[in-house]
């Protein structure tokens, strides 16, 4: 699945056709992307892990505090390329087959009428370094002790990324992108720290998407209940809020109103341990409460690798059945 991307594409497409999916957020995937996005190393099935184990990010201090000075000397682009080659298992080299296969896999999905609504991921400086430095070192030694340095580094990374992402949008003719929020949520980050270190990147990426006529999807893992009001700073009907089951999705609708599209949030544990009847009940109630319009039914974050196939089908059937009884006016 992670070495033969044509087989992976066909497997994904077969499954999405089986459940009658209307769209997807990935056509293929490589775990090497994770290490690149997090300045980290990944443990892979068939290598460090068993053949059928799920890939994992290795959480350790892969990047040293002194590396920030190297970024200032070399520039973010040059540092990132060197660091990933030397400290992240040379991920760019491993990703060549993935990037080579990606265009033809996209084409297969579009021909099948199942468009991919996310063409690539915009990564905030916060997430890069939280991954590379590890959570404890990044929060305690960097953000708390050296905030001025962090602002300087973040500004350098953001300036580079905005130019790079603008070109990537042009090159890929992107329909939509992810703006990732993982460790930037209020479970870990105070409101003051969020506005200081996270929101400037979120807003800059959002503005770029609007400028380029691309749909931004804020992919928010963990519980964002305390920061939902922050998104009222953005214009309605211009973005998608993708939530997992940790954020109160009904509160999100209440706070943000009817004109914000919400994607989610069928719990992964329900897909793995629940029954089709429980899944259908959850989806139906969710659509009654926050939909049906402006709501995209999906699992929270991603469909887990051990989800029951009958539960995945039940999620889709419940959404389509609900739509039949609530025709668009």
Image (cartoon, rainbow, N blue to C red):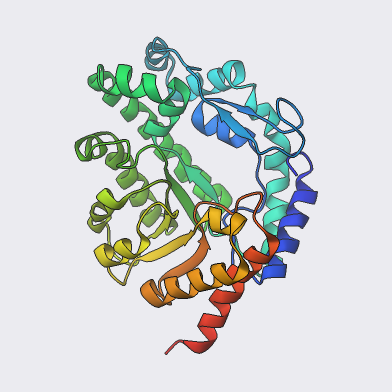
Q: Is residue 187 left or right of residue 71?
A: left
Q: Position of residue 293 (x, y in %)?
A: 41, 76
Q: Quadrant of the C terminus?
A: bottom left
Q: Residue at x 38, y 22 (%)?
A: 136
Q: Is residue 150 visible?
A: yes
Viewer-closest of 313 and 281: 281
Q: Quadrant of the N terminus?
A: top right
Q: Is residue 244 left or right of residue 120?
A: left
Q: Residue at x 39, y 12 (%)?
A: 65
Q: Position of residue 306 (x, y in %)?
A: 66, 50
Q: In the rendered image of this protein, does residue 78 appear above or below residue 53?
A: above
Q: Residue at x 42, y 13 (%)?
A: 67
Q: Position of residue 76 (x, y in %)?
A: 44, 23
Q: Position of residue 319 (x, y in %)?
A: 54, 75
Q: Quadrant of residue 249?
A: bottom left
Q: In the rendered image of this protein, does residue 293 appear above or below residue 128?
A: below
Q: Is residue 22 visible?
A: no
Q: Is residue 2 left or right of residue 129?
A: right
Q: Quadrant of residue 33?
A: top right
Q: Residue at x 21, y 40 (%)?
A: 191
Tag count: 0
Outermost residue toward the top in this view = 66
Q: Quadrant of residue 94?
A: top right
Outermost residue toward the left in this view = 192
């Amino acid at each position: 699945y992670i070495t033969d991307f044509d087989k992976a594409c066909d497997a994904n497409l077969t499954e999405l056709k089986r459940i009658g999916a209307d769209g997807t957020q990935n056509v293929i995937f490589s775990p090497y992307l994770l290490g690149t996005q997090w300045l980290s190393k990944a443990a892979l099935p068939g290598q460090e892990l068993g053949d059928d184990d799920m890939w994992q990010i290795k959480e350790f201090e892969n990047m040293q505090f002194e590396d920030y000075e190297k970024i200032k000397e070399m520039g973010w682009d040059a540092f990132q390329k060197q660091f990933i080659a030397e400290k992240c298992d040379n991920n760019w080299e491993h990703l060549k087959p993935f990037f080579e296969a990606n265009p033809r896999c996209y084409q297969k999905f579009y021909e099948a009428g199942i468009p991919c609504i996310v063409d690539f991921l915009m990564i905030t400086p916060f997430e890069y370094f939280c991954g590379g430095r590890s959570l404890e070192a990044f929060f305690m030694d960097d953000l708390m002790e050296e905030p001025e340095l962090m602002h300087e580094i973040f500004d350098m990374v953001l300036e580079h990324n905005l130019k790079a992402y603008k070109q990537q949008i042009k090159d890929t003719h992107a329909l939509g992108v992810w703006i990732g929020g993982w460790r930037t949520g209020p479970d870990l980050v105070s409101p003051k720290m969020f506005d200081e270190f996270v929101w400037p990147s979120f807003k800059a990426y959002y503005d770029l998407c609007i400028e380029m006529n691309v749909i931004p999807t804020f992919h928010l893992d963990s519980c964002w209940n305390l920061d939902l009001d922050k998104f009222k700073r953005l214009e309605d009907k211009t973005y998608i809020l993708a939530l997992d089951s940790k954020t109160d999705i009904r509160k999100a609708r209440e706070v943000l109103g009817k004109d914000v599209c919400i994607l989610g949030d069928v719990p992964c544990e329900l897909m793995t341990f629940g029954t089709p009847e429980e899944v259908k009940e959850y989806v139906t109630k969710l659509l009654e409460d926050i939909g049906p319009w402006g709501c995209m039914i999906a699992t929270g974050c991603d469909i887990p690798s051990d989800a029951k196939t009958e539960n995945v089908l039940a999620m889709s059937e419940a959404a389509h059945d609900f739509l039949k009884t609530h025709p668009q006016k």
